[in-house]
Amino acid sequence: MTDQSEVHEDVHQIDAVGLVCPLPVLRFKKRTRHLPSGTQVDFLADDPSGRRDLQVLCELTGHRIEWVREEDGGVIRYRICLA
C-alpha cells in the first residue's frame, strides 16, 4: 500500500488497498478534489464494501465508473471519469 497517488499514461492512480470503510472513499475524495473534470482515475481497493460506497459517491458527484476489473489478491481496479 502506498500513501501517494501516481500518474501513469494520463491516468491518475489512487491506491486504497488495505484500507477499510470509510477510508477508501475518503482517500478518493481527498485525492480527486482538485483534479479537473474529465480526468481518468484508476482507483484500487480491496475493501468488500468499497464498490457500493464508490457507486454512491459517483451518483452524488456525477463521476462515471467506466469499468471494473478484479486483479490478483482481491484487489479491484475501478476506472473512473471525474465529473
Image (spheres, rainbow, N blue to C red):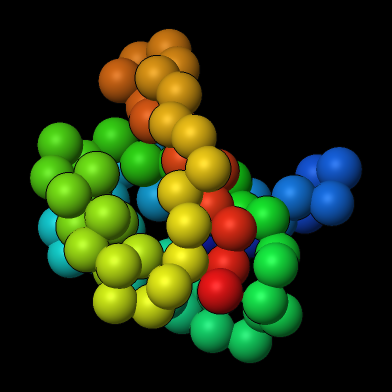
Please give the name of the residue rendered at 40% of the width and 19% of the height, measured from the top-left corner: 70
Residue 16 lies, with reference to residue 77, above or below; the image says below
- Residue 2 seen in this snapshot: no
Q: Quadrant of residue 8?
A: top right
* Residue 71 quadrant: top left
Residue drawn at (86%, 43%) of the image = 9
Q: Residue furthest bottom?
A: 34
Residue 51 image offset from top left, x and y in percent? 24, 44
Q: Residue furthest right?
A: 9
* Towards the viewer: 50 or 20: 50
Task: Indicate the position of residue 77 as horizontal and vertical percent values.
Answer: 47, 34
* Relative vertical location of residue 43 with respect to residue 27 in this rendering, above or below: above
Rendered-image quadrant of the C terminus = bottom right
Q: Is residue 21 left or right of residue 67?
A: left
- Residue 37, located in which quarter of the rendered image? bottom right
Measured as percent of width and height from the top left, residue 45 is found at: 36, 41
Is residue 19 in view? yes
Please, is residue 53 above or below residue 68 in the view?
A: below
Q: Nearer the viewer, residue 63 or 21?
A: 63
Residue 60 in the figure: left or right of residue 4: left
Give the image location of residue 39, x and y in percent: 70, 65
- Is residue 12 shown left or right of residue 78? right
| Most foreground residue, 65 or 14 | 65
* Residue under the point 47% across and 66% down: 63
Image position of 77 with respect to 56: above or below: above
User: Residue reaching furthest top?
Assistant: 72
Report the number of discs.
0
